Amino acid sequence: MAEDTARAFVCGHPVAHSRSPLIHGYWLQEHGIAGIYERQDVAPEAFETFLRNLADGPYVGGNVTIPHKQTAHRLVDRRDEAAEIIGAVNTLWFENGRLCGGNTDAYGFAANLDATAPGWAEGGVATVLGAGGAGRAVVHALRERSMRDIRIVNRTVARAEELAHRFAGPTSAHGWEALPDLLADTTLLVNTTSLGMAGAAPLALDLAPLPAPAVVTDIVYVPLETPLLAAASQRGLRTADGLGMLLHQAVPGFERWFGVRPQVTPALRDIVVADL
Ligand code: ATR
């Protein structure tokens, strides 16, 4: 292998399902870069050693996925602002020999909506279903875009309260029973729970109360059209699917490792869709 071949990885456990190699492999080929992006299946008990040895080579950086995102957050030398706020790291790189960790999920979430539902933040009233790690990234993105009212709805209300407290400002916590009232003036509805994912329980919501200009988005991307998105489309609302977020969150990492800012194109989407 040539000395100047930049190598990056996605590290998870399991990691076989990750679409990141497909995405980065596509961009490497598209830009004629002699780089490598590969899977690294690392068990939880081996992850700390994996990180500590990273500086010895051969990688310029990589992605971190389940179940390592919080551990990476704890162990990196430096974190970017998003990783600090979200409490999880999904992208690693080196600066002056120091291991840096970032989180590109909030960026990917907002960039996907910018691309598919321009003006999405203007209504200013978001209802977010779920208060896990993905919910945190979404609420951070919404705060960055100055949404004026962010309602976090969760089965376990205490978790929603914790998340609302973490972000303070115009955030509030609710149980699912509050949804019909909350939907009536919601301009952006986001599902960050696993409901609606293939194999999980469906997300059955009556979207009738949502106002007509509302945008609906789901972080679930298998199936690509979740029952929530199907119901929203049927109502004639604008939608953005979870695959778009996955594709966009990969952009900043690729740019850091390989020096080119790649584009999320229909051709890339088609290739990933064919692999779902
Ligand atoms: P992630 O980091 O991917 O967001 P997580 O931290 O496990 O994953 O969070 C999953 C989210 O989906 C949570 O908001 C969870 O609600 P609880 O906090 O009450 O557990 C939500 N969720 C998962 N299954 C659910 C179900 N059957 N009904 C309602 N909410 C569910």
Image: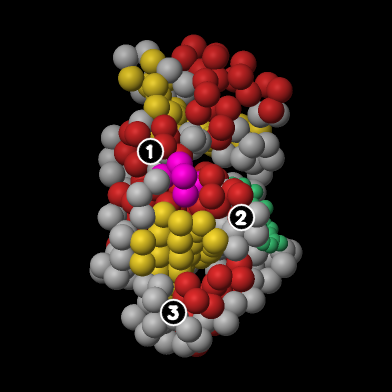
Residue of label 3: 184
Residue of label 1: 82
On the image, the x and y values in percent for residue 251 come to: 36, 46
**CA gap, disc 3 to disc 2?**
20 Å
On the image, the x and y values in percent for residue 189 come to: 45, 69
Q: Which residues are magenta?
A: 163-167
Q: Earlier in the sequence, mark 1 or mark 3?
A: 1
Residue at 65% x, 59% y: name it.
155
Question: What amino acid is found at the position of numbered circle 2 in the picture?
Answer: Val
State which quadrant residue 116 falls in: bottom left
Question: What amino acid is found at the position of numbered circle 3 in the picture?
Answer: Ala
Please give the label number shown on residue 179.
none
Residue at 40% x, 65% y: name it.
126
Query: At numbered mark 3, what does the secondary structure look like: helix, strand or loop?
Result: loop
Residue at 53% x, 27% y: name it.
72
User: Neighbour class for label 1 at 10 Å: few (<14), some, many (≥20)?
Assistant: many
Q: Is residue 50 visible?
A: yes
Residue at 35% x, 49% y: name it.
169
* C-beta proximity under 8 Å, tags 1 and 3: no
**CA gap, disc 2 to disc 1?**
24 Å
- Residue in the foreground of this view, choosing between 220 and 256: 220
Quarter holding the C terminus is: bottom right
The dominant secondary structure in magenta is: helix
Please give the label number shown on residue 157.
2
State yes or no: residue 164 in magenta.
yes
